[in-house]
Image (cartoon, rainbow, N blue to C red):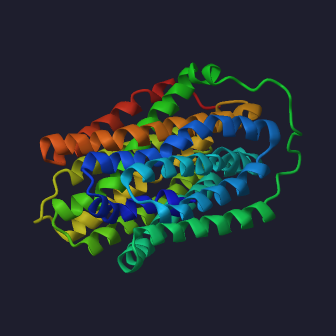
Amino acid sequence: MSAIRLGLPALVPFIKAELKLSRTEVGFLSSVLNLGSIAAGIPAGKAADRFGEKPLIGFAAIAAGLIVMGVNWVESYGSLVPALILTGIAAGSSTPAGSKAVAGWFSADERGTAMGVRQMAVPLGGAIAALSLPPLAIGFGWRIAFAAAGAAAVGSGLIAGYFYEEPAGTPVPSKKRAVGVADLALRKEILAVLIFAFVLGGGQWCYLTYLQLYLVEVVRLPLTMAAALLASGQIFGAAGRIIWGVSSDKLFHGRRKPALVIVGILAALMSFAISLFTPETPLWLIVLSFALLGLSLLGWQGLSFALISELVESRAAGVAIGLNQSVALSGIMLLPPLFGFFVDMTESYRGAWILLSGLILFTLSFFGWIREK
């Protein structure tokens, strides 16, 4: 699934060139992929709470893959947008079920690590996409490259649907009224997690969407090297999901809040640091900075899913995770085009990176509301 969602940024330079898009349109292109996922997150979470995870896990990947394979027939920006929305609906249905499954299979002192392992697949799939899809696009066009990612999603959905088993003791489908979204969102500790997810989710996709363009246009690196740096950031993001999960389980004894604070501070510092890059910046410093930014900005989601599932009762875990997903995806939808618009208006990336850094620090001011059990 991540090969679809994170494969799109790897193909942005090819799509931008062929369809003659502005940077703002590029930002919207990344955002509309998540529009469907925003709509799907909460209903899918409620469905997982009521009916269990198994029915959603395989079907979502298969549906998303088939839709993406149909992108071969897309001829314009206007026809690509609805295809990406449909893809988002299918892809977004799997996250609440998958994360709830992990929460059910593992105890509190293992859950952070387990959620990190699950979430590690997201940037790892993105790294594979960043390395494999651009060469395919060069040889066969970006549509064929995107369709290849869709075929991989279909295969993964078939495998997951066949082999996954729900944990023993999983409740039978319930007719009890699901916990309301408003009931959750009005709780201060939940709201603090949602604010963090909104800004870090949007910041994550500013990184993924504009990294290659920034390195090529401002730092004057070759496109192949920029793609390699994007891939390395994804790899460090995958490692971060494990590192932060293990640290929350072992170093912080099952507490997620301290690890997320460290993530936020590191992401803010690195966002500010890369705003200062020029063509004269040493390559080793560029690599180090983007690695640390990937470690933090791409490495937090597993912890946020673990935290929000632990702040609610088990029968509401699915809808809480779905709400967290929808809010994070709202940030993903809104912040990248605003980032691109800011760059278009100022003709500079520096202010945009600095503004992102400030927003990340701002989210941490709400963490005083969180009281972990």
Q: Residue at x 47, y 72 (%)?
A: 144
Residue farthest along the left direction in this orientation: 280
Is residue 289 at all visible to an observer of this figure?
A: no
Is residue 225 or residue 300 the one in the foreground?
Answer: 225
Horizontal side of 2 relative to 286 (left or right) equals right
Where, quadrant-wise, is the C terminus in this rendering?
Answer: top right
Residue 82, placed above or below residue 290: above
Is residue 109 or residue 193 the one in the foreground?
Answer: 193
Residue 46, placed above or below residue 108: above
Where, quadrant-wise, is the N terminus in this rendering?
Answer: bottom right
Q: Residue at x 42, y 41 (%)?
A: 333
Q: How many circles with numbers are drawn on the protein? A: 0
Q: Position of residue 119 (x, y in %)?
A: 57, 55
Is residue 14 or residue 345 the one in the foreground?
Answer: 14
Q: Residue at x 64, y 46 (%)?
A: 93
Residue 51, placed above or below residue 29: above
Horizontal side of 16 relative to 319 (left or right) equals left
Q: Position of residue 171 (x, y in %)?
A: 87, 40
Is residue 246 or residue 305 the one in the foreground?
Answer: 305
Q: Residue at x 54, y 42 (%)?
A: 36
Query: Which quadrant of the view contains residue 319?
Result: top right
Horizontal side of 131 relative to 320 (left or right) equals left
Q: Position of residue 184 (x, y in %)?
A: 62, 24
Horizontal side of 176 relative to 328 (left or right) equals right
Query: Which quadrant of the view contains residue 179?
Result: top right
Residue farthest along the bottom direction in this orientation: 139
Is residue 165 at all visible to an observer of this figure?
A: yes
